[in-house]
Amino acid sequence: MQITSLEKELTTNSYPGRGIIIGKSPDGAYAVTAYFIMGRSVNSRNRIFVEDGEGIRTKAFDPAKLSDPSLVIYAPVRVLGNKTIVTNGDQTDTIYECMDKQQTFEQALRSRTFEPDEPNYTPRISGILHIENGSYNYAMSILKSNNGSPDSCQRYTFAYENPAAGEGHFIHTYQGDGNPLPSFEGEPVRIGISGSIDAFTESVWNSLNEENKVSLFVRYIEIATGRYETRIVNKNR
């Protein structure tokens, strides 16, 4: 798989939905992750990211406009020791709780399926970064319906050991806009990662569709020490 420009992937898709990016900085010193949310409805657009301990949580920007919190209010990012969990739903908590009991990433997700938002049946996408003793690896997962049919769940996990500097992978919920929304297909897209945390954050945010983008989280984790820097951008201010 050839390296694809992340900016091109984002600017040519008006509605990738929610997306997870994981990789390594160009100098090889940092594990990189990003998570963004988009929205078409008032309920989906009425959100911001806020810090919550070492992770983040979604929050209604205007509580009076929150009509249904079930699939829009959750913790996208949680940290369990040397593991950083990033997902597009409340399966973040499932992964955290199961791994805290010595279960694996895959075992945790066995108890979950795609979202019950008929007719879209939005995929659940998840990622985990593991940093230990100066080494780094990550994995990504997608749980999706069988081509829009809720009768079966298709489960895919992709694991990346010793990732190359300046490279990463990008997975998102939808192939593009539509009604119903078409689920992501294939492997996570191999993308290039460049620049400092601020340059990377600006590039991702500016590449997302202006009308549909809602919030962005970016974190650079120093592989040698585990120390990290975080950036949060919210359209609602």
Image (cartoon, grey):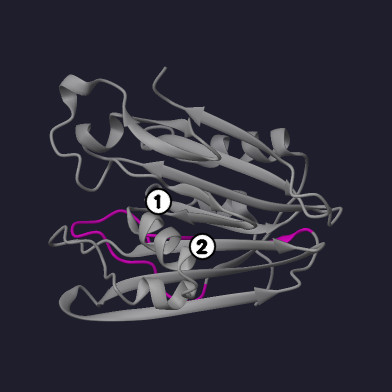
Tell me, yes or no, if residue 169 can be seen here. Answer: no
Front-lying residue, 177 or 190: 190
Residue 224: image x %, image y %?
83, 54
Q: Which mark is residue 18?
A: 1
Screen quadrant of the C terminus = top left
Q: Amino acid at mark 1?
A: Arg
Q: Which mark is residue 167?
A: none
**Stretch of the chain drawn in magenta:** 166-187
Question: Which residue corresponds to the image point at 40% horizontal and 56% vertical from the top-left?
Answer: 92
What is the magenta segment's predominant secondary structure?
Answer: loop
Q: Is 100 rendered above or below residue 19? A: below
Residue 123: image x %, image y %?
32, 65
The secondary structure type at the circle numbered 2 is strand
Residue 108: image x %, image y %?
39, 71
Q: Which residue is mark 2?
A: 127
131 with respect to 125 (left or right)? right
Asked whether 185 falls inside the magenta stretch, the response is yes
Residue 54: image x %, image y %?
56, 40
Question: Which residue corresponds to the image point at 31% horizontal and 53% vertical from the top-left?
Answer: 177
Q: Amino acid at mark 2?
A: Gly
54 with respect to 25 (left or right)? left
Screen quadrant of the N terminus = bottom right
Distance from disc 2 to disc 1, alpha carbons, whole Å, reads 13 Å
Asked whether 15 falls inside the magenta stretch, the response is no
Crowding at label 1, few (<14), some or many (≥20) Cα neighbours within 10 Å? many
